[in-house]
Amino acid sequence: MAIICYASRWFEFPACIDFVQIPRSTRGRPPLSNPKGKAKDGLWGLWPSDGVVFDRTCTLCPRLAAFLAKGREAHPDYWCAPVAPFGDRRARLVIVGLAPGFHGANATGRPFTGDFAGVLLYRTLYRYGFASRPESVSRDDGLELIDCRITNSVKCVPPGNKPLPVEIRTCNRYLAAELERHAPPGTVLLAMGSVGHQAALRALGLKPSQFAFSHGAEHRLPTGQTLLDSYHCSRYNTQTGRLTEAMFERVFARARELLGPAPRGPARATPQATAGAASADVRSAGVSSRRASARAKSGRAKS
Ligand code: SF4
């Protein structure tokens, strides 16, 4: 037993980081297509598996671990493991999503990459100077986030995009460790949906019931961070018109306003968003949290 424990820790040791970053399902496959795109830390901007902020071997949620095991069988070319946060560890903007999508982050190993949800997100990040490119294609595409990091409330893909409350609570230990170490006072947290909103608050030791979720809401937290809320940029939300591009951009415009001008890169908002942000009390763009929770309960949206 001691040998097994030692070996499992050894695989997470930084000296073996190149081994750790390649998912089991891709071992033996050809090398990633663009080695030059590899980030300086060798992790393409992903978090190393340190077992505290992120643990690539975690199986604390039996239902999710079993789902991943089935996924590996059906899709041996998929990542099919907990998905690490992506981006700058000293970022002042931290986006808290829900969980990997099966054919998105669960396939590629990078949050919001590979399915519809990331299209609007990365385009918007680029417009506001938080990303070096408007698209995220794969872990090795060379994309860099600028003063921004994306993390998830639940690191493993849940069946039907719906993690159980116990799974959200179990995985909160990683988000709590991440925020404690890397989201000091002054950080802007941007919650994508009510699950991300509640998970971020819990991770900071705050009571979610004291901060109502609504799209466009802005909460000054007693811990010193600012929490902005947005509906999740899922295909369902955008196709039904619940979340428009202009609504989404107004939230990022507010984040940019709070953090100051982009150090580099473009900030090209659409005219609708610019007009909205100029008059801009983002809070006034809020939509009833009752409507949000009623829709969430109906199970039609994954925010
Ligand atoms: S969801 Fe989080 S806590 Fe649960 S198994 Fe995955 S990494 Fe571990």
Image (spheres, rainbow, N blue to C red):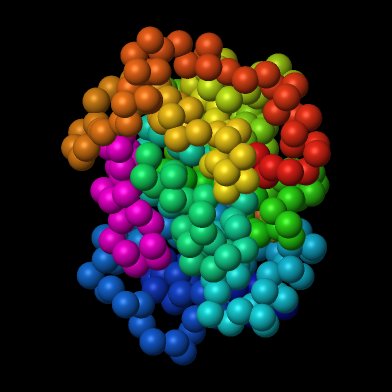
Q: Is residue 221 above or below residue 7?
A: above
Residue 90 seen in render: no
Residue 72: % across, % down: 64, 78
Residue 163: % across, % down: 74, 50
Number of marks: 0
Residue 15 seen in render: yes
Q: Residue furthest bottom?
A: 28
Q: Is residue 228 left or right of residue 253?
A: right
Residue at 55 percent of width and 74 percent of height: 78
Q: Is residue 48 above or below residue 70?
A: above
Q: Is residue 128 above or below residue 169?
A: above
Please give the range of residues in magenta.
Answer: 125-147
Pick the residue in front: 246 or 27: 246
Quarter of the image for the C terminus: give it: top right
Q: Most prominent secondary structure in the magenta stretch?
A: loop
Residue at 34 percent of width and 67 percent of height: 140
Pick the residue in front: 62 or 118: 118
Residue 87: % across, % down: 38, 49
Quadrant containing ligand 1 reads bottom right
